[in-house]
Image (cartoon, rainbow, N blue to C red):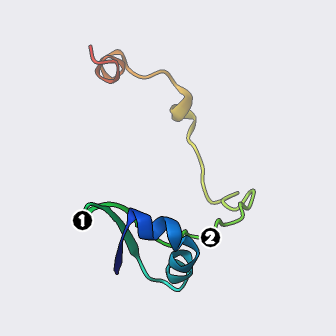
Amino acid sequence: MAVVNVHQAKTQLSRLLAQVEAGEEVVIARRGNPVARLVRCQPETKRQPDVLKGKVSIPESFFEPLPEEELASWEGR
């Protein structure tokens, strides 16, 4: 894990990003104190509609009102 100061991070950002892309973590420090960590982002996955269709069922009781005592506990009463 590389530790760089803010000035180095500003002047060498492209090189630091290349290190992060290669799997390394980079910590940016101000006056020797860690402030931020650069890590590789997870690639966004494409959403797939209906991927759980037929695998999940919601019972009718889900739509019924909550009992008064449970509703009160959710509302902090």
Image position of 56 (left or right of 66): right
The 10 Å Cα crowd at callout 2, few under 14, some 14 to 19, many 20 or more, is: few
Position of the N terminus by quadrant: bottom left
Residue 22: % across, % down: 53, 86
Marks 2 and 1 in Cβ contact (< 8 Å): no
Residue 19: % across, % down: 50, 82
Please give the name of the residue rendered at 24% of the width and 65% of the height, measured from the top-left corner.
32
Residue underneath mark 1? 32
Residue underneath mark 2? 43
Earlier in the chain: of badge 2 and badge 1, it is: 1
Q: Compared to 12, does 56 lie above or below?
A: above
**Snapshot quadrant of residue 4:** bottom left
The 10 Å Cα crowd at callout 1, few under 14, some 14 to 19, many 20 or more, is: few
Please give the name of the residue rendered at 54% of the width and 68% of the height, measured from the top-left corner.
41
Residue 12: % across, % down: 52, 74
Q: Compared to 66, does 2 lie above or below?
A: below
Q: Compared to 72, does 39 lie above or below?
A: below
Q: Compared to 26, does 60 lie above or below?
A: above
Disc 1 residue type (three-letter): Gly
